[in-house]
Image: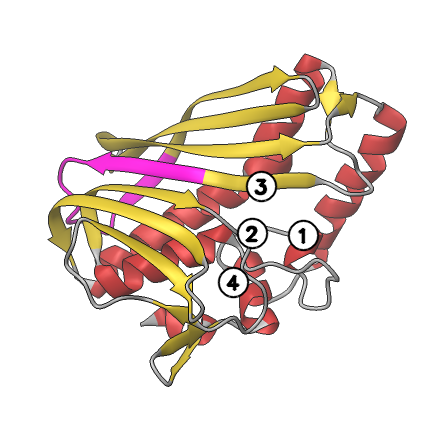
Amino acid sequence: MFLDAYHCRSGGAVRISAEQASRFAKEVAGDFNPIHDADARRFCVPGDLMFALVLGYYGLSERMGFRFRGMVGRDVPLVFPDSDAPGLSIADEQGKVYLDVERDGEVVRDPAVVEAFIRRYAAFSGRNFPEFLEPLMRERGMMFNPDRPLVLYDSMAFELRRPTTCDLDMVLDTASLEVDGKRAEEWLRFQVTDAEAVMGSGSKKVVISGLQPWDETRMQPFISEYTARRDRFSP
């Protein structure tokens, strides 16, 4: 599968190098968060790559939910259990859980369909900043700390009615930011379309910590550098 380029499996464990994770973030998700750079001090594997590997190993179910419970570092040996149970957890060899998964319904294992769904969702998810999040923060008059952005992928879920096609896309339905002091929850609700016909829906939740009042003089350079990194990138 195309995900072979973004992880390796040895001794029964899945490992993701910093270079593999960074390439997935940029090449597939269009995500240029510095935390996914291979040389980042606080490096972590993109949540979208963990999501993608679950679909790659277990298939695409009609109903799926993902809850991220920890940040995966470089080369952490992960155990993807051999299980048909509706619920499963991805943990390291010491038992620390990083991702909980719930699934139900028909399972599609056609590699082309699974790959199409992964690519479309990752690309949608990677658009969050600045396309979705920046206007929400501006509207609420709040922002994350540009010097240390704490924007964490919390969870996502979707439900499909007929996951059997490659001609699909994810379209934003609503975006909202619920602020509580220095913390906020961002919700992206989306529709899954097939040749413009709605075939399902889903949501993504992001938790933002360390909120502070909006400061254009600090945030605009951060946005400019982010978009410049994206524009300079060449696979």
Residue at the far left: name it: 106
Tell me if label 3 and label 2 are in contact, CB under 8 Å.
no
Tell me if label 2 and label 1 are in contact, CB under 8 Å.
yes
How far apart in space, not on screen, are marks 4 and 1 (Cα)? 13 Å
Q: Amino acid at mark 2?
A: Gly
* Secondary element at tag 1: helix
**174 versus 149 height, above or below:** above
Q: Amino acid at mark 1?
A: Arg
Looking at the rendering, the stretch of residues picked out in magenta corresponds to 155-170
Tell me if label 1 and label 3 are in contact, CB under 8 Å.
no
How far apart in space, not on screen, are marks 3 and 2 (Cα)? 17 Å
User: Circle 2 is placed at which residue position?
Assistant: 30
Mark nearer the N terminus (4 vs 1):
4
How far apart in space, not on screen, are marks 2 and 1 (Cα)? 7 Å
Which residue is pictured at 63% across the width and 39% down the height? 151
* Secondary element at tag 3: strand
- Circle nearer the viewer, 1 or 3: 3
